[in-house]
Image (cartoon, coloured by chain):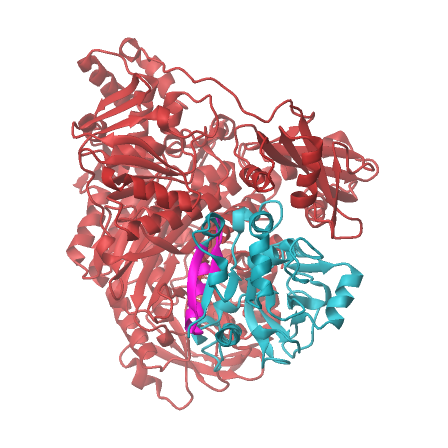
Chain colours: A red, B cyan
């Protein structure tokens, strides 16, 4: 039957929101002036319905006559100069299609075979050229990896195809060169690893199938097995314990009483209150986000949420975090390396991806940050985290038993994201985008939400033995790991597919999102399927656990993969790697004081790493689940940032889950050890400033590092040492972590860009009563402003102030974690005693930025004095972590509160909304907080609007 | 007596649990009910005194926000809903639930199938989450009894919340007193200016009721302000959780049924 087309647009006179957005980009980003208006229309296509039925769909479902009009099988906009229609590529799941099918059934239209939707763009203006349209299409309208321009009405919307064959690869007869070629772009293994695989197949006297090679490559990928973190390490000639062991040993030694599980499950779990536990996981999604930032960030969020959902016997996600490192949005196009996306586009699209996934799933995104550095132009660091709650007695997984069933729950399997695990382990090159575009896809948060609802219900009925998510490596990874100790038999022909035409190995390796695997006792099957059905979730038996310690994958009657679990999981020999890091001497700035203090202050506030990120936070639903006791922004005008977020995951109870983080790529470039200490201290200080007890904190590490050559590995070794020293000094353990060691870009001409090494430390903890927490906004006119903490203000290396002066500097803050602990203890005690009206930790932009933000929040001014003996600019702009600005009542002697912790009484809050600074008896500045605020708010408003 | 409240959920509903909490705190007995349970008859709508459609992204807000659920309800539960309303029971739609109510026609006329107003894309083109002030208008709305003239602060979080309709319908709603909430300045004057009016709604309309005052729909989220500490500025001044009042009013009315 033919396809019915319905086109819809808003009636004349109503705002063209989407069209105007594109017009703005055309005029401002592309600087194309010939286009004067852009209009859009939606196109819906239905296959298998009559024209009469299409009319019903148009009127009852698609077009709302109050503000829209429609046409059936004819154009809807006739006056334009250029038109393009954009649709998802065949095979990329259009999330709307399933809703169209459902609504048609609900309207009693039962012959519909397939539906699709797309968008028409109409460009109006005189003198528009084809090359301008091509530019607009490429840069703004079409996302090449998932979308395409449609030039004619499709013949059919039904995707057909026949089953792909399983191929036997003649590995045993291959030369070394042939093995290298096979590995490149497909397996991402090195020659030594290929040889080990060859010898395994020599031993069993046959050649491998494609499915077996893919399975081994996935299991042995850096992404899944962390070869570097497990390697035997030789640093400057000395053998050292593998990085991962070092972290785990430090945690074990700390023996923190609240830790329920560390480094073994999909997330780290700590005890909460009244029989609950909380868990946290932070992931990177750099490679997919670099080539398709919207889909990459979406699937990053979806994946880390499933890590929480797949913790123990299943947890509920209560918070989402996002930390991005990108180049500056104003980067000239000529500076964008070949094969890379412009940072302005990239940043807006990753934000949109996090927004659409979290908002739709109903998970508040309430902690995060953006860091800008030009060296991220070749590859961003996209870090997403999630936190959850679950009953403490369900926080460990059961072991699958022989005879247990493996059930696939959630979305169907398509050709999405194949090679994600192996791909993200490789370096990024100019070829990355074209070769690996199948490694990205569009997420479907509604699928994940209903799956989560169903699984939590099943967990509460004790139906789940073990659960894990399908992330990188798909079923191969999920079932390979679940059956590691016992063996599993899998039936690929049973897997529900999005469309036919996949080869068995593709089904096995597909990274289609929103799927999880659960192991259950066969007696529970009926009940599980029933629950899933109630939530509109598919649940399918796809295999069973055997007890023979083999991985046997079948397609119908053909065995396509038959491997020994022992070889698969332990056949990869430990690597021996060497590392050595030498400090480099970086530029020092000219030694002079600011000539014009108000201008310098405003410039600091307007730097990208200091400026307000509020326009991003507004796009995230940070209030859903109603658990926010300390939101990202507060204060009189709701525009002052807080240090951490505090949520109440058990409604009606005052128990708080505190979440914060710290990272600083610039300091890591100067010195990976002290840079990493800074990140840890910053994460913890953010949590402490909000009221968390230093005894109740656990940490999560994310190392986002260049490809581990000797120098990068030397730096990584120092960063890990910093982490373990931190654990030893503070007792705060790392209980989950991830490394991503592929932040290196190599161009066709051989240019190498190493992305700055990032250690992101996330902190989370529990507190008993959220009413004993503080925010950063000044509360009362005339109260005292006290600076608390240890700092040497000459340690200015890596500061925003130095960056403004055009240098990095070498002398960075060298923190002592055991001294910091005393400061944290003091801040915590004073918050418990209700002695602090406000508290804010000092970070980028130094005391100056910290003070200004506190003034913004209270709509109050401040009068402060810099001690005459101090150098004024360093005093104001030093960025030593672990220092706090506090507001205390006028009548309290600060010495009574802070005792032997170093503190300075800086001045007082003031009803006149100006910041006035004197140095000794000299006035440095008297500037309106509104002026400072305008400078501080401008940069992100320019990128995100608002 | 604790009135029974049906909190309707389906794929993509995501403010159901906190809405349930609000109902329980206000003295009701909430039941999270999947639309499938109403369709199969496992749960009977008439067993409840009140129906709430909570916030979220039902069916991904595909086509229009709330549209797919509205079509589902209009196709399978039209008579049930009509019966429910005609028995004088209460209906509340929050955010996505408000979008569903206008797309079924239950608002503003109380007549399923008669769709006369809409909630469309925010003028900004963006989803935004921010606390907004709203003036409570004098009306016969059950949910806002005793709140007339006050200014309440709720969190709004939506991308499609611009209230829009034709001139005639608009003036009919105004003269019938069906406008219940208006976005306003901190001083309480209704406003069209962004961001106080976060979406460009006509006449600053944030919430409306049907002529009987028993069906209410609003974009901002009262269920997010049930405990004092849910407000960003509870540390600055003592705040009454105004969100709770809406639910308390409904429950005390339902108790008389």
B85 in the magenta segment: no
Q: Relative to A636, does residue A377 appear above or below in the rendering?
A: above
Measured as percent of width and height from the top left, residue B50 is found at 51, 66
Q: Position of residue A521 (x, y in %)?
A: 23, 40
**Left or right position of A440 against A391:** right
Give the residue displayed 47% in from the left and 30% down from the top: A498
State the image quarter where residue A223 is shown.
Answer: top left
Residue drawn at point x = 68 percent, y = 35 percent: A54
Q: Quadrant of residue A505?
A: top left
Answer yes or no: is residue A873 visible: no
Task: Write the start and end of the magenta stretch as one range.
Answer: B7-33
Residue farthest to the top, as pictured: A173
Q: Foreground: A831 or A41?
A: A41
Where is the C terminus of chain A found, in terms of image quarters? bottom right
Horizontally, residue A310 falls left or right of residue A910, namely left
Screen quadrant of the N terminus of chain A: top right
Image coordinates of residue A915 in percent, x first then y, are 55, 77
In this rendering, is residue A798 above or below A495?
below
**At x 63% / y 54%, what residue is drawn?**
B104
Visible residue check, residue A333: yes
Query: Residue B10 in magenta?
Result: yes
- Indicate left or right for A343 with A524 as reference: right
Residue closest to the eye, B13 or A283: B13
Q: Give percent across and percent down for residue A492.
A: 34, 25
């Amino acid at each position: 039957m033919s396809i019915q087309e319905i086109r819809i647009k808003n009636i004349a006179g109503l705002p063209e929101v989407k069209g105007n957005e594109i017009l703005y980009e055309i005029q401002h980003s592309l600087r194309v002036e010939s286009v004067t208006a852009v209009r859009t229309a939606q196109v819906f296509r239905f296959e298998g319905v009559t024209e009469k039925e299409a009319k019903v769909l148009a009127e009852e479902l698609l077009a709302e006559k109050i503000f829209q009009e429609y046409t059936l099988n004819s154009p809807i906009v006739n006056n334009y100069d250029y038109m393009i229609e954009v649709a998802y590529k065949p095979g990329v799941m259009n999330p709307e299609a399933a809703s169209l099918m459902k609504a048609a059934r609900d309207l009693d239209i039962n012959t519909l075979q397939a539906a699709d939707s797309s968008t028409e763009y109409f460009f109006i203006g005189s003198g528009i050229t084809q090359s301008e349209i091509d530019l607009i299409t490429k840069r703004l309208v079409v996302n090449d990896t998932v979308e395409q321009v449609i030039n004619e009405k499709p013949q059919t919307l039904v995707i057909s195809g026949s089953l792909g064959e399983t191929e036997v690869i003649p590995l045993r007869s291959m030369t070394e060169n042939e093995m290298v070629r096979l590995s490149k772009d497909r397996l991402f293994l090195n020659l030594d690893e290929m040889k080990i695989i060859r010898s395994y197949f020599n031993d069993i006297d046959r050649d491998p199938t494609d499915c077996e090679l893919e399975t081994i490559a996935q299991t042995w990928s850096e992404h899944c097995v962390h070869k570097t973190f497990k390697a035997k390490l030789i640093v400057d000639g000395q053998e050292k314990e593998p990085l991962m062991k070092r972290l785990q040993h430090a945690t074990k030694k700390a023996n923190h009483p609240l830790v329920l599980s560390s480094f073994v499950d999909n997330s780290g779990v700590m005890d909460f209150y009244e029989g609950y536990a909380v868990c946290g996981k932070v992931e990177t999604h750099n490679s997919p986000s670099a080539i398709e930032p919207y889909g990459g960030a979406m699937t990053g969020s979806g994946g880390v949420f499933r890590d929480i959902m797949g913790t123990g016997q299943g947890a509920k996600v209560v918070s989402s975090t996002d930390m991005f490192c990108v180049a500056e949005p104003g980067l000239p196009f000529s500076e964008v390396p070949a094969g890379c996306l412009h940072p302005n586009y990239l940043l807006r699209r990753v934000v949109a991806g996090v927004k659409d996934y979290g908002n739709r799933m109903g998970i508040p995104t309430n902690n995060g940050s953006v860091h800008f550095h030009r060296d991220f132009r070749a590859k961003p660091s996209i870090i997403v985290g999630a936190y959850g709650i679950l009953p403490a007695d369900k926080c460990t997984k059961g072991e699958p038993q022989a005879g247990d069933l493996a059930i696939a729950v959630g979305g169907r399997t398509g050709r999405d994201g194949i090679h994600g695990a192996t791909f993200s382990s490789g370096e990024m090159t100019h070829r990355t985008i074209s070769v690996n575009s199948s490694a990205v896809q569009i997420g479907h948060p509604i699928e994940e939400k209903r799956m989560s609802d169903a699984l939590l219900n099943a967990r509460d009925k004790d139906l789940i033995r073990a659960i894990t998510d399908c992330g990188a490596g798909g079923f191969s990874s999920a079932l390979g790991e679940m059956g590691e100790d016992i063996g599993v038999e899998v039936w690929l022909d049973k897997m529900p597919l999005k469309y036919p035409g996949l080869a068995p190995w593709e089904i096995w390796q597909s990274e289609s999102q929103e799927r999880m695997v659960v192991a259950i006792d066969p007696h529970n099957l009926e009940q599980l399927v029933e629950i899933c059905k109630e939530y509109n979730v598919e649940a399918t038996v796809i295999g069973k656990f055997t007890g023979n310690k083999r991985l046997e994958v079948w397609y119908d009657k053909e065995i396509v993969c038959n491997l020994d679990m022992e070889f698969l999981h332990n056949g990869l020999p430990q690597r021996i790697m060497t590392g050595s890091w030498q400090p480099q001497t970086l530029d020092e700035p000219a030694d002079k004081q600011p000539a014009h203090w108000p201008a310098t202050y405003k410039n600091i506030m307007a730097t990208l790493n200091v400026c307000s990120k509020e326009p991003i936070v507004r796009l995230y639903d940070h209030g859903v689940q109603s658990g926010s006791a300390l939101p990202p922004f507060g204060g009189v005008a709701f525009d002052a940032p807080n240090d951490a977020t505090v949520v109440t995951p058990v409604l009606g109870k005052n128990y708080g889950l505190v979440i914060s983080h710290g990272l600083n790529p610039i300091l890591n470039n100067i010195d990976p050890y002290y840079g990493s200490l800074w990140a840890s201290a910053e994460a913890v200080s953010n949590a402490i400033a909000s009221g968390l007890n230093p005894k109740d904190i656990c940490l999560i590490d994310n190392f986002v590092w260049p490809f581990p050559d000797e120098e990068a590995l030397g730096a990584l070794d120092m960063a890990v040492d910093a982490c373990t020293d931190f654990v030893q000094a503070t007792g705060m353990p790392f209980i989950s972590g991830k490394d991503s060691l592929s932040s290196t870009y190599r161009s066709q001409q051989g240019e190498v860009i190493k992305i700055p090494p990032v250690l992101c430390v996330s902190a989370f903890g529990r507190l008993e009563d959220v009413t004993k927490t503080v925010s950063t906004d000044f509360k009362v006119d005339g109260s005292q402003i006290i600076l608390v903490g240890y700092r040497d203000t000459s340690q200015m290396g890596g500061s925003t102030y130095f960056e403004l002066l055009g240098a990095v500097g070498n002398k960075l803050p060298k923190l002592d974690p055991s001294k910091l602990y005393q400061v944290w203890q003091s801040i915590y005690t004073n918050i418990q005693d209700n002695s602090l009206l406000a508290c804010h930790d000092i970070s980028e932009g130094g005391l100056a930025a910290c003070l200004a933000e506190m003034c913004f929040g209270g709509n109050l001014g401040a009068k402060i004095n810099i001690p005459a003996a101090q150098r004024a600019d360093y005093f104001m702009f030093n960025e030593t972590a672990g220092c706090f600005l506090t507001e205390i009542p006028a009548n309290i002697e600060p010495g009574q509160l802070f005792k032997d912790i170093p503190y300075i009484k800086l001045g007082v809050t003031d009803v006149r909304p100006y910041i006035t600074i004197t140095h000794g008896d000299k006035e440095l500045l008297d500037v309106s907080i509104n002026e400072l605020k305008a400078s501080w708010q401008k940069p992100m408003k320019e990128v995100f609007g608002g | 007596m604790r009135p029974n409240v049906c909190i309707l959920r389906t794929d993509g509903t995501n403010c159901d649990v906190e809405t349930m909490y609000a109902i329980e705190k206000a003295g009701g007995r909430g039941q999270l009910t999947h639309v499938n349970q109403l369709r199969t008859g496992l749960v009977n709508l008439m067993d409840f005194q009140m129906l709430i459609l909570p916030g979220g992204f039902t069916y991904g807000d595909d086509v229009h926000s709330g549209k797919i659920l509205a079509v589902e309800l209009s196709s399978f539960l039209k008579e049930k809903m009509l019966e429910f309303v005609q028995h004088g029971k209460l209906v509340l739609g929050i955010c996505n639930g408000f979008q569903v109510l206008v797309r079924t026609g239950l608002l503003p006329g109380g007549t399923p199938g008669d769709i006369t107003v809409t909630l469309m894309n925010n003028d900004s083109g963006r989803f935004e989450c921010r606390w907004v002030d709203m003036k409570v208008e004098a009306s016969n709305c059950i949910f806002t009894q005793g709140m007339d003239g006050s200014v309440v602060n709720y969190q709004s979080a939506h991308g499609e919340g611009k209230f829009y309709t034709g001139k005639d319908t608009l003036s009919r709603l105004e003269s019938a007193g069906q406008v219940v909430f208006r976005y306003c300045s901190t001083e309480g004057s209704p406003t069209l200016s962004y961001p106080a009016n976060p979406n460009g709604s006509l006449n600053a309309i944030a919430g409306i009721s049907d002529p009987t005052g028993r069906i209410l729909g609003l974009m901002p989220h009262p269920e997010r302000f049930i405990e004092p500490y849910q407000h960003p500025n509870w540390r600055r001044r003592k705040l009454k959780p105004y969100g709770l009042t809406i639910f308390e009013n409904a429950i005390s009315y339902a108790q008389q049924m």
